[in-house]
Amino acid sequence: MTALLELSGVEAWYGRAKILHGVGFSVGHGEVVALMGRNGAGKSTTMKTVMGLVPEPQGSIRFEGKEIAGREPFQIARLGIGYVPEDRRVFSELTVMDNLEVGRQPPRDSAPHWTPERLFDLFPNLGRMRDRPGGAMSGGEQQMLTIARTLMGNPRLLLLDEPSEGLAPVIIEAMAETIRVLKGEGLSVLLSEQNLHFAGSIADRAVIIEKGLIRFDDTMAALKADEAARSQYLAV
Amino acid sequence: MLDLVLTQTLNGLASASSLFLVACGLSIIFGVTRIVNFAHGSLYMLGGYLAFTLVTWLGPADPLGFWGGVVLAVLLTGLAGVLIEVLILRRIYQAPELFQLLATFGVVLMLQDIALATWGPEDKLGPRAPGFRSFVILFDNRFPSYELFLIAVGPVVLGLIWLLFHRTRWGVLIRAATQDREMVSALGVNQRLLFTSVFAFGAALAGLGGALQLPREAINLHMDLSMIAEAFVVVVVGGLGSVTGAYLAAVLIGVLHAFGILILPKITLVLVFLVMAAVLIVRPHGLLGKASVEPRGHAGQLFLLRPADRAAKLFGAVALGLLALAPLVVPDHVILTLTDLVIFAVFAASLHLLMGPGGITSFGHAAYFGLGAYGAALAVKWLGSPMEEALMLAPLMAGIAGAIFGWFCVRLSGVYLAMLTLAFAQIAWATAFQWVDLTGGDNGILGVWPSAWAVPKTVFYYLALAIAVLVIVALRVIIFAPFGYALRAGRDSPLRAEAIGLDVGRLQWAAFTIAAVAAGIAGGLFAFSKGSVFPTYMAIPRSVDALLMVLLGGVQTVAGPVVGAFAYMGLNEQLAKMTAYWRFGLGLSIVLLVVLFPRGLVGTWLYWRARRESAAQATAVA
């Protein structure tokens, strides 16, 4: 069976600076993969490149067997990839309900179908502040809102860019639980993380990126056992 | 007295409605697409002309004919907006904002000639609106009922837009895209469709503004630029992207106009300027605006401004040598043209200081050129100054204006700043145009001749050339002096520049003033070269001339604008000789240039060279 998402030889630039030098890895159906590495290693760029947000990438990105490299972000989203950016980017002037409305897409057979009511079951906090503008929410609430907003597009694969960044430990724990629920619903997740403890608690597999190249690709258990890899690629 | 105040207030409110319709369309389009649509005034004009034709055709006396014609005109203007978006703007969303502005200005030029060819040069007087032909007695004053209808249109449209933006998915998407369009597209929304629909909507609003003017005043070919300048003022005062702000500002400006005509008929626009200044001092982003306009890259930012290499210096020396020798071989009329070209090279170089190292886009640089010209001409006319003295006063006048206007401008950035510079230039233009006693108004000031020794064309040419070389060399020295580097630091990263102790606002203010002085020198020379000055020296097209010269040559080099000035003015002259519809030709050239080379001529070349180099490096490493 082919992987849900498969990257091979992906190169990407920001202006004249080359960030990705030939990235290749895959995410299987129903799998949670942690893309790990230090600051500036290329985690966010990988996410953005998959989403079509980095112009003119080279190499191949396949989703459900279809080549998506070079397609526009909205087309990629409509194929079933949901992107939750690192800096959250909630629409601060829009209410919670309107934020969800922006993400709404028609249901698809192959993925769980989300409605605002179902999302409020998953994120009870959001249900209590439907008319609050995004700008008037706490960081944790905003993080929940961005995930909920992305789920409104009924994705098969969720790209979570640094979901634990800047959140309080309690919220991080809730985030981990949410990701487990989503996995239970059948979603695949690719998350970028620096926090090994958090990633270790939810991911099936770990992929380590450094200087725009993949250096490690194995199960989470293997990474936990491999002290050399951890200190070489992850230790600060 | 009281009833006078009342009637003028009502007059002001009535004229505010059309202003609001145009400004709010402009604002909404900018919010989503980040394009300042210079052609928005042209769409307003188009709405007026289309309404004239359709209403006349469908029967102006019949309510269905009149209002049907208005509705059709609005829809057709919206359609024109779709055409502009699909054919032109869609291809240049990634281009630097300045290029986008220029492309829409190209559309302004094209629409002007299309309107001229279709409707002719005469003003078109429309019929009165069926159902609103009578007067209403208000406080013992007869007040046209159509004016009351117009007063109601503003708030009604404002309310409808609010509902549209808060109660429909389309409106929610528009508001979301205004904040973060990339995120909206990553959530699966087709930006193209959204942008096209927004543009059509904004164009239709402008068309409505124009069509509703039909029973009120004659439709003419000057509606476009006068409206766009006012709409810019409204948008700057109201706050970019805020519909309610646009309404408040339109009412403020409209009422101000109405009273200004009563109190200070000659300098109404100066009054508008003072109010705008007051608002911007208190709220730099307008009444209801927010500072969150995302920063955008400039055309030349990726590339360093380097001193010329030896080949370029040699080329420059040869070119200068040829210019110096030219009078020996070419006939008199060519010397006149060369004089103009040399003067425009100074003008372009002065703008380059702002646009290149300064990173400041000025859409009203002609103000300083024109003020220089007027400074010289006024000195000759009112002070009886000889040429030498007048040429000193020219940069003084331009410099003072530059220091005053610049003080406001450098408080803003990006498109906001560009709009403000344009508004200032319009005010300078309007002052020259309206203050007939001092400036002669439209007739200009004649008899601005050089001193006896400089009357021969060749002598004046050498004088202009000498001054031009001095000014351009001085500008170059400034650019490569510590001041120039500090200016570039402020352009590339204002925050970091401030953090190392540079007062970025001050640096930009100084650059603005210096550029104004240099433009004033060019203007003074131009006045004596032509022997006369006219308000058109400060009009919008002249400012765009300067931008085109700089962009054609490229902001990346100091020599660029000088080369650009020669290339552009040469092209302009040829076009004007070839066809009466030279505006259309020029507009089309601008649009094509921007669409085909969205990074500019020099920028495109540098980009490909850089891409090739890094590819070569990559292969070498592998």
Image (cartoon, coloured by chain):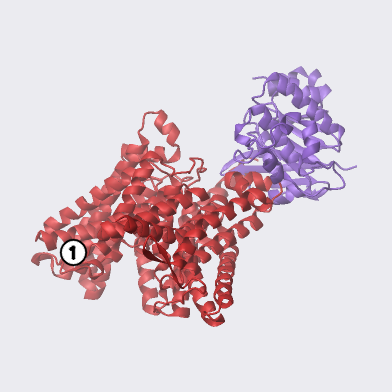
Chain colours: A purple, B red
- Tell me if residue B288 comes above or below residue B7 in the rendering: above
Instruction: From the top left corner, tell me how far across and down residue B414 is, in percent.
Output: 44, 47
| Callout 1 crowding tier (Cα within 10 Å): few <14, some 14–19, many ≥20 | few
Seen in the image, is B394 located left or right of residue B28?
A: left
Q: Amino acid at mark 1?
A: Asp
Q: Is residue B39 visible?
A: no
Tally the marks: 1
- Tell me if residue A172 comes above or below residue B269 in the rendering: above
Residue at image position (36%, 63%) is B140
Q: Quadrant of residue B495?
A: top left
Query: What residue is pinned by disc 1?
Result: B437
Seen in the image, is B315 located left or right of residue A17?
A: left
Residue at image position (75%, 22%) is A173
Q: Quadrant of residue B452?
A: bottom left
Front residue of this view, candidates A78 and B289: B289
Give the quadrant of the N terminus of chain A: top right
Q: Quadrant of residue B584?
A: bottom left
Secondary structure beneath label 1: helix
Give the quadrant of the C terminus of chain A: top right
Seen in the image, is A76 located left or right of residue B575?
A: right
Instruction: From the top left corner, tell me how far across and down residue B104 is, in percent.
Output: 49, 62
Seen in the image, is B446 located left or right of residue A43?
A: left
Instruction: From the top left corner, tell me how far across and down residue A18 is, in percent.
Output: 61, 40
Q: Is residue A32 visible?
A: yes
**Which residue reaches farthest right?**
A1
**Chain of the residue on which disc 1 is drawn:** B
- Tell me if residue B337 comes above or below residue B367 in the rendering: below
Residue at image position (45%, 51%) is B235
Front residue of this view, candidates A187 and B441: B441
Instruction: From the top left corner, tell me how far across and down residue B49 is, in percent.
Output: 48, 74
Front residue of this view, candidates A118 and A56: A118
